[in-house]
Amino acid sequence: MNGLNVIYADVISDLKENKNSHDLGKTKLAELIDFLFLKEINKKHFLLKIKENDRSIFSEYIFYLELLLNSGKFLTIRRGVTDNTKISFAINDQRFDGYNPPHNWDHENVTLKKSKDILSDYLALDFFKNKEYSYRKSISYSLRRQGDFKDVYKLNKFSLGRDIDWKPFMFDLLGFNGDFLRLKYKNDNEIESIKTFIENLKREYSVRIEDRDEVVAEKLIVESEYIEIESQIDRFNFYNHDKELIKQGIDDIENKINVLNAQSYALNYEVDKIRTSIKNKFSFDINKVEKVFDEAQVYFPDQLKADYSDLIEFNKKLTTERNKLLKITLEKKSAELKSINTELLQINLEREKLLADLTDSDTFTRFKTCQKDLVKVEGKLLKFDEKLKTIDTIINQQQEIEHLKDQIRTTVDSIKSIYQTTDKNLKYGRIRKHFSKYYKAIINENAVLSWNINTQNNVEFIPPKVKSKFDHKKDTAKDEGNTYMKLLCVAFDLAILISYNEESYYRFVYHDDVLSQQDNGIKLRLLKLVDDTLKENNLQYILSAIKADLPVREDSSLIEFDDDDIVLRLHDKDPSGTLFGFEF
């Protein structure tokens, strides 16, 4: 329904009845619209959170949303609460008044993931073509709830997320190429991951890149020792002691012992590494962090503490699962080691039996000594090889970092080039023009949109600046207040809608509680701006307001909305006046 749509909450109750007109469901309506635009929900969502007899109080509810498409046809979306991942769609030539749901569905009980693709095809929004994200990325800019008025650019749902989750999109929305930002963040993250990997290698294997050549030199010395010991063993001549012993397979037995000793050493090395890894436990003391905040006299939010606790719990679970796998591997390796040691014991008994008749005990003693030395030297060579392999891996990873840095430098050069030519970006120019125009119409002051590049060479979307009436070079602090920030958000959302109005994009915006805590003159100018904008453009502007926030005339009488503009009336006289007809 194009034009002005008002969600109006009337305060009927006496003040002594201690009721709250803000609890009638105005904000829940925005959440419901978001739900019907196929937002994924969990048990914390209001539709699932409140339960009776272990079932959601909304379990039997089925909701419908009707959209006017660019084709002139009407799309109906059906989504229930119990089976909220099964969606149905119906296309009709005319809207349904009443409301009577369609009898026939073009797509019925489709999975949520596939439904998003279907809805995206129906909406056919030009802005999202060839983008990595879908129509849902910007839906919240058309459904501004009270928590979304704190920042023009960064919505509440992005407050705890990463910059890569919203800044590239915002760069696209303002008319630039967000792929540059996306690539910059991706490469930054990749570099940090590689650095962490390198530090773990250095810590686990106790190596440094600058020691590589020294390790090579030490390995050469040990290799010489190995050759010398091997030569000594080769020089032992048992031919004169007993030919039959040699025929019975001493050489084969000794070779088998050498192989098993090497395997035993390797398994011991792996078992020790696994045990060390199991002992390394995740350590993070949330109380110490809270103490630091207290000592710095900085407020440590409960939500942040909860997020830290969730992170700690996640890491503990991750460590537990990892240790389970390591213990399984440890058991397997230990069993293999036990088997090899048992076999070594048996073969050594056979060797001792074969060598028992040797008459030259001194030669035999020296032979055993050489064997032991050879095993030790082989172990040293294995360690050196492992160190060199680790160092070379680190060097290769550092080369990859340099390659990524080259890509980042190229990307940053492109971003800086964009920054130097913002005046030539027509889309950005239109958005800024409309934004300043709308804000001036509401406040009669100039406000400007701008962005810059911070010290990390990332794009920074700075809050819009409100300029002084008397000195355009001087900024005011009005953009820092909550009421003014709300109006900056309103101007921005309208500017986006108007700037994209000539192409396929959203043609509606929902501003929750937009008149709250505003000066009477501001309310009047805001509503006039909305009225003028709707007359000039084919848009739908939805606002929620309570009776106490309506503007007044000079005689203090309320300026009420026309009945035709009010699409939903709520009141606080009894539960029937709430959004769902009952309190929860």
Image: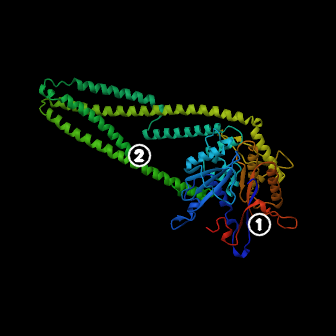
What residue is disc 2 on? 277
Q: Is residue 291 visible?
A: no
* Quarter occupied by residue 425: top right
Crowding near the residue tagged with mark 1, few <14, some 14–19, many ≥20 C-alpha atoms within 10 Å: some
How far from the left and from the top, in percent, is residue 214?
A: 43, 29
**Residue at left 64%, top 34%?**
411
Mark 2 and mark 1 lie on one chain; the one further toward the N terminus is 2
What residue is disc 1 on? 548
Is 94 or 44 nearer to us in this picture?
Answer: 94
User: Is residue 518 shown left or right of residue 362?
Assistant: right
User: Is residue 121 shown left or right of residue 432?
Assistant: left
Q: Quadrant of the C terminus?
A: bottom right
Q: Is residue 427 visible?
A: yes
Is 253 or 134 nearer to us in this picture?
Answer: 134
Task: Check disc 1 and give the amino acid type.
Answer: Ala
Q: Quadrant of the N terminus?
A: bottom right
Task: Check disc 2 and give the amino acid type.
Answer: Ser
How far from the left and from the top, in percent, is residue 390?
A: 44, 34
Distance from the alpha carbon under mark 2 to that under mark 1: 64 Å
**Residue at left 46%, top 53%?**
316
User: Is residue 498 shown left or right of residue 361?
Assistant: right
* Secondary structure under the numbered disc 1 in the rendered image: helix
Q: Residue 262, relative to residue 157: is it above or below?
A: above
**What colouring does the structure picture have?**
rainbow
* Quarter occupied by residue 32: bottom right
